[in-house]
């Protein structure tokens, strides 16, 4: 199913828009669309073939056209243009647990950090705590997140884990004989 890929695309678009300081309603529209697509029990490609994309909550004409373009080409022109508008490494920074778009934007604007190497240098030099709102605990969490990435561990935040679990829960709800289920893990 392409649902996860389309949802990832919309999340990346939302992250870039947030870094760029775009309209919060537009950002939220992409985030909500990603969430709704992930929770589908049906394959988005099938929904597209049947012309039912706009029946998905949060998916209007523009987003449905983006989904169709992605399904046909593996990307969208809008996403490619957005990616060009920020340093490529900023998206890489968002893979660090506990580092979101607002913090990545702050690091870029205030310290010129545009990739993982730049962030590691700033960490070593103690530059992050010089920024307003960045405390020692935040710096420690970022350092820990970088180490997890280096070690290649597949750890994720609770929020991301819940997002990843949603499509499975939606599928379980559709199965006959399933009476009760719950999130689990550590």
Image: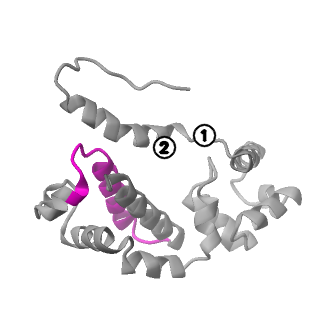
Decide which of tag 2 and tag 1 comes sooner along the chain.
1
Quick check: 17 left or right of 57?
right
Which quarter of the figure has residue 50?
bottom left
The residue at 71%/58% (across/down) is 132
The residue at 79%/55% (across/down) is 129
The residue at 53%/81% (across/down) is 85
Quarter that holds the C terminus: top right
Closer to the camera, 17 or 67? 67
Q: Is residue 22 above or below residue 31?
A: below
* C-alpha separation, residue under disc 2 versus residue under disc 1: 10 Å
Can you give x and y, in whole percent of width and height, for residue 175 in the image? Answer: 20, 28
Can you give x and y, in whole percent of width and height, for residue 178 in the image? Answer: 23, 20
Can you give x and y, in whole percent of width and height, for residue 66 in the image? Answer: 29, 72
Magenta residues, as a range? Answer: 21-45
Closer to the camera, 86 or 67? 67
Residue 155 - label: 1
Residue at far right of view: 125
Quick check: 73 left or right of 17?
left
The residue at 23%/59% (across/down) is 45
Q: Could you classify mark 1 by the number of other residues whose Cα lies within 10 Å: few (under 14), some (14-19), or many (20 or more)? A: some
Residue 44 - label: none
Which quarter of the figure has residue 86?
bottom right
Residue 160 - label: 2
State whether residue 105 appears in this view: no
């Amino acid at each position: 199913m392409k649902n996860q890929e389309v949802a990832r695309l919309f999340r990346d678009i939302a992250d870039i828009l947030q870094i760029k300081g775009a309209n919060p309603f537009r950002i939220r529209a992409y985030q909500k669309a990603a969430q709704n697509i992930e929770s589908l029990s049906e394959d988005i490609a099938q929904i597209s073939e049947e012309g039912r994309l706009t029946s998905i909550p949060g998916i209007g004409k523009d987003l449905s056209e983006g989904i169709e373009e992605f399904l046909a080409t593996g990307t969208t022109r809008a996403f490619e243009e957005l990616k060009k508008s920020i340093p490529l490494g900023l998206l890489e920074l968002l893979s660090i647990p506990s580092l979101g778009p607002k913090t990545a934007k702050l690091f870029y604007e205030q310290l010129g950090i545009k990739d993982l190497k730049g962030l590691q240098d700033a960490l070593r030099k103690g530059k992050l705590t010089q920024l307003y709102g960045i405390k020692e605990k935040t710096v420690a969490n970022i350092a820990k997140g970088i180490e997890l990435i280096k070690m290649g561990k597949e750890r994720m935040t609770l929020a991301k884990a819940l997002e990843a679990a949603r499509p499975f829960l939606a599928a379980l709800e559709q199965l006959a004989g399933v009476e009760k289920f719950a999130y689990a893990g550590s």
